[in-house]
Image (spheres, grey):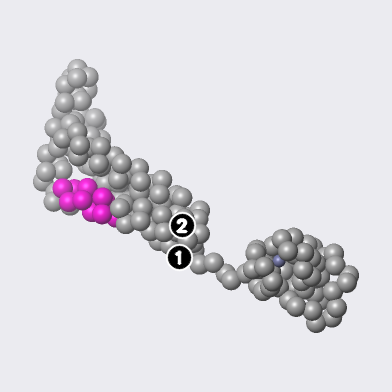
Amino acid sequence: MSIRFFCEKCNKALEVDDSDANGKVICFYCKEAVSVPSESTAELVKEGEVRAVNLPKRSALWGVVGLICGLLVAGIIGGMIVWVISTTALPMSRDPEFAKLSQTDQQAKMKAAIKTFSEERPVIQKAPMVLLGLSTLGVIFSVIGLVKNSGRKGAIVGIIICGAYVGLALAGMLRS
Ligand SMILES: [Zn+2]
């Protein structure tokens, strides 16, 4: 079965397979993307009249890569926070002696413990640079995805996460 209709842009008669009903195709004549009605609206098209060209399937590659970078960045940051807190601050807060300290002393002690913990682990020292590199790539891939309309949704999430990290890292560098 086929659907016959007039191109909404150039008014030429088009014929497409009914599997394209309610979808979009590229007009054979004007090369614009046009909507296909759910059923034929053009009775005048003769059998075998020119068919519209199916829209090429868009690849979502760039947006997906940008999204993966963003999820990796968020995952690494989240994982490290959980790791550091669960091995420093959490055991400390269970210590009855610690509970007796004033709030300012508690905060200072926790900060010191986290600092020592980080300094002893090269992985934590290197993480900011790795994250910055990964985020920068994520932003680049996502922007390509947006420009090329390749995986728009993933690209937007990628830009939000990676862009936020790049922004925070740059702000931190400027401050120090
Ligand atoms: Zn047209």
Please tell me in which quadrant of the rendered image residue 36 appears. bottom right
Relative to 146, does residue 109 appear above or below in the rendering? above
Task: Estimate the x, y position of residue 76 in percent, counting from the top left.
Answer: 30, 50
Packing grade of label 2 (10 A; few <14, some 14-19, many >=20) is few
Q: What residue lies at 85% left-to-right and 64% top-to-bottom?
A: 41
Please tell me whether residue 126 belongs to the stretch shown in magenta.
Answer: yes
Type of residue at label 2? Answer: Val
Picture disc at residue 145: none
Q: Which residue is mark 2?
A: 147
In-front residue for pair 121/20: 20
Question: What range is drawn magenta here?
Answer: 124-134
The quarter of the image holding the C terminus is: top left
Q: Position of residue 116 (x, y in %)?
A: 12, 39
Q: Secondary structure at mark 1?
A: helix
Instruction: Name the residue that disc number 1 marks.
Output: 61
Residue 104 in picture, x, y percent from top left: 19, 19
Front residue of this view, candidates 11 and 111? 11
CB of residue at label 1: within 8 Å of ligand 1?
no
Residue 107 left/right relative to 141: left
Foreground residue, 155 or 88? 155
Q: Is residue 101 left or right of residue 53?
A: left
Q: Quadrant of the N terminus?
A: bottom right
| Furthest-top residue in this view | 102
**Cα distance between the residues tagged 1 and 2:** 13 Å
Which tag, 1 or 2, sits closer to the chain's start?
1
When asked about the image quadrant of residue 21, the answer is: bottom right
Q: Amino acid at mark 1?
A: Leu
Of marks 1 and 2, the one in the foreground: 2
Crowding at mark 1 (Cα within 10 Å: few <14, some 14-19, many 20+)? some
